[in-house]
Amino acid sequence: FDSLSDSFALVGIGHNSDRFLQWTNSREKVDHLFDDSSDKENFYIANCKIPITRDLSSLDLNSELLIGVHPRNTSFFAKKLYQKYGLQNIRSIFNPPNLL
């Protein structure tokens, strides 16, 4: 987390993202939770006061993002986030801390 800014957004909110936040004790650094599922919108993950949303348009182009999707889908989602929103500071919770 030393290479991340003071806060980050987490994309792909499921059991992997939740466990990552528990294991790293990093909930206090999360400022946005995003998931493309309308079933998760406005819900919360355990011990986190930030609601899950689908709208990434509020993010600054320099925002730090961590993707919590399975590694086989990480590159696809990183490319999609770049093409649709211009977001570039994207990392995966599964990989060493390199930009994708």
Image: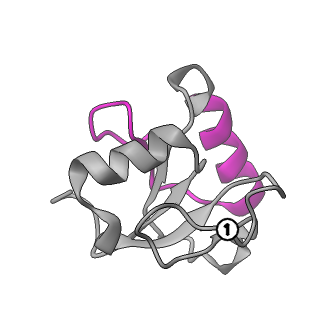
Look at the image and give the residue range highlighted in magenta: 75-100
Task: Give me the residue at 73% from left, 58% from top.
Answer: 40
Q: Of residues 34 and 78, which is closer to you in this image? A: 34
Image coordinates for residue 75, horizontal then vertical, percent: 58, 30
Q: In the image as oriented, which residue stretches furthest toward the top?
A: 72
- The residue wearing badge 1 is 43
Q: Classify residue 74 by image quadrant.
A: top right
Looking at this rendering, what residue extends furthest in the front direction? Answer: 46
Locate residue 64, reporting x and y percent.
43, 63
Give the quadrant of residue 5.
bottom left
The image quarter containing residue 54 is bottom right
Residue at the image position 34 percent from the left and 30 percent from the top:
95
The quadrant the N terminus occupies is bottom left
Whether residue 95 sits left or right of residue 71 in the image: it is: left
- Decide: is 19 above or below 43: above
Q: Is residue 45 above or below residue 67?
A: below
Q: Residue at x 34, y 53 (%)?
A: 21
Magenta run includes residue 17: no
Examine the structure image and report whether residue 84 is included in the region drawn in magenta: yes
How many labels sit on residues?
1
Q: Residues within 10 Å of mark 1 (few under 14, many from 20)?
A: few
